[in-house]
Image (tube, rainbow, N blue to C red):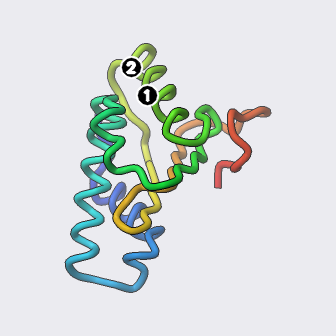
Amino acid sequence: MRPPIALLLGTALALSPLTAGAQGPQQEANKKIVVDFYEKAINQKDFEAASKHLGSRYTQHNPNAADGPEGLKAFLGFLKEKCARGSAIVDIFKLENGKVVEHWDVVQPVPEKAANSNGMF
């Protein structure tokens, strides 16, 4: 089951400096980027297809995934193996210059030890 698109986009766009207080074409472009990234990464678990949306950095706030593109690739491999169906309840993305540079999700409990040092929020 996919999360509600309105919730996904609302949280993603709220964190995007490109859309803070802005309406119009840039907001629509960011929506398309986030939806395509989510579809390719989370729903299809296809790193190669999703990676076109990654920025020059990729900060991960999911404590079960390492930072950077390689961390995302490894996490998607894990999801492909362990979670053939299903997806997170809420994912939040930050965009810079039309690229995904940061990710949060809020489906898991806070673990004692994380694969990255960014904190969940």
Q: Along the line of sight, which residue is nearer the eye, 22 or 112?
A: 22
Seen in the image, is 80 located left or right of residue 60? left
Seen in the image, is 49 located left or right of residue 116? left
Q: Which residue is mark 2?
A: 80
Residue 20's place in the image compared with 35, above or below, is below
Badge 1 marks a residue whose secondary structure is helix
Q: Which residue is mark 1?
A: 76
Image coordinates for residue 19, horizontal then vertical, percent: 37, 77
Q: Are marks 2 and 1 in contact (CB under 8 Å)?
A: yes
The amino acid pointed to by label 2 is: Lys
Corner quadrant of residue 106: top right
Residue 84's place in the image compared with 118, above or below, is above
Seen in the image, is 112 located left or right of residue 93? right
Corner quadrant of residue 99: bottom left
The amino acid pointed to by label 1 is: Leu
Residue 1's place in the image compared with 29, above or below, is above
